[in-house]
Image (cartoon, helix red, strand yellow):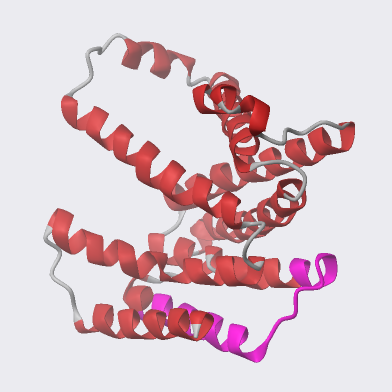
Amino acid sequence: MPLAWWYRKSLRWPSTRTDFLWWLFTTLFFFAHLVTYFYAAQTTTIANCLILFCTNPLWTALGAYFWYQEPVRGRLMLAYLSGLAGITVLVVNRIQVAPEAWRGDASALLSAFLFAGYMLTGKRLRQRCDNLPFAMGMYTLTGLLFLALCFFTNQADVIATQALLWPLPSRVWIALAILIGLTTYGGHFVMTRLMTHLPLNLMTCGKTIEPVLASLFAIVLFHEIPTLTTGIAFVLSSFSILLLFS
């Protein structure tokens, strides 16, 4: 908000009723994507969640083809298949087919659809306004929606209890700073900025390398020893990225 206010005179803001409707649709897709993804991570295995969510480039490609006439080239499909194969190799030993996990699996797949909707509607709005006001409005409303969800799901008592635990430990503040700096500004904020510069297909397919990068971070942060499957997954995912940018 301070940045948007400081640069307000040089920024393109949503100015019409149509702009605000697109902003609302994009925010709702973003919020619903996060809710379903978190629910899936809690109610099914991480492996199932990753595999099912990583189908989002397919749904984005279909939407971009019909909506923005972005061609689905053979190289793109090969890159996606290679990236998905890398993720499968990485988590294949942890994939479970359990009847009681169907809600989590369905939620992960729904999250992939919603993420595609977020990308498609976000690109439409980003063509009409700058990234800073777009992100400021979307993150603010998303935060308010999560707060409302807490009260709707009777989590208000949990919030009040945690508020009494101040001051929070330093490691919590460090974790929050990393989440804000890397995940929000280094991830989503950069992605919405690139919406007007790169094809959506390229951006979403590039996300298939995320699980492999997370595994590499786990080596440094948690001393998880890499296995042969991690190496194979890294090679396959790296090959997919090289295909995209070659």
Q: Can residue 111 be seen in this snapshot?
A: yes
Q: Main secondary structure of the magenta part?
A: helix
Residue 119 image-quadrant placement: bottom right
Q: Nearer the viewer, residue 216 or 68?
A: 68
Q: Nearer the viewer, residue 73 or 84?
A: 73
Residue 208 relative to residue 169: left or right = right
The verdict on residue 72 being magenta is yes
Q: Quadrant of the N terminus?
A: top right
- Measured from the top left, where is residue 177 in percent x and y? 31, 34
Residue drawn at the location 59% of the way across and 72% of the way down: 202
Q: Can residue 55 be seen in this snapshot?
A: no
The verdict on residue 121 being magenta is no
Residue 158 relative to residue 173: left or right = right
- Measured from the top left, where is residue 213 in percent x and y? 32, 66
In this rendering, the answer to whether 87 lies above or below 17 is below
Q: Nearer the viewer, residue 14 or 180?
A: 14
Residue drawn at the location 23% of the way across and 33% of the way down: 174
Report the span colored magenta: 63-89
In this rendering, the answer to whether 20 lies above or below 56 is above
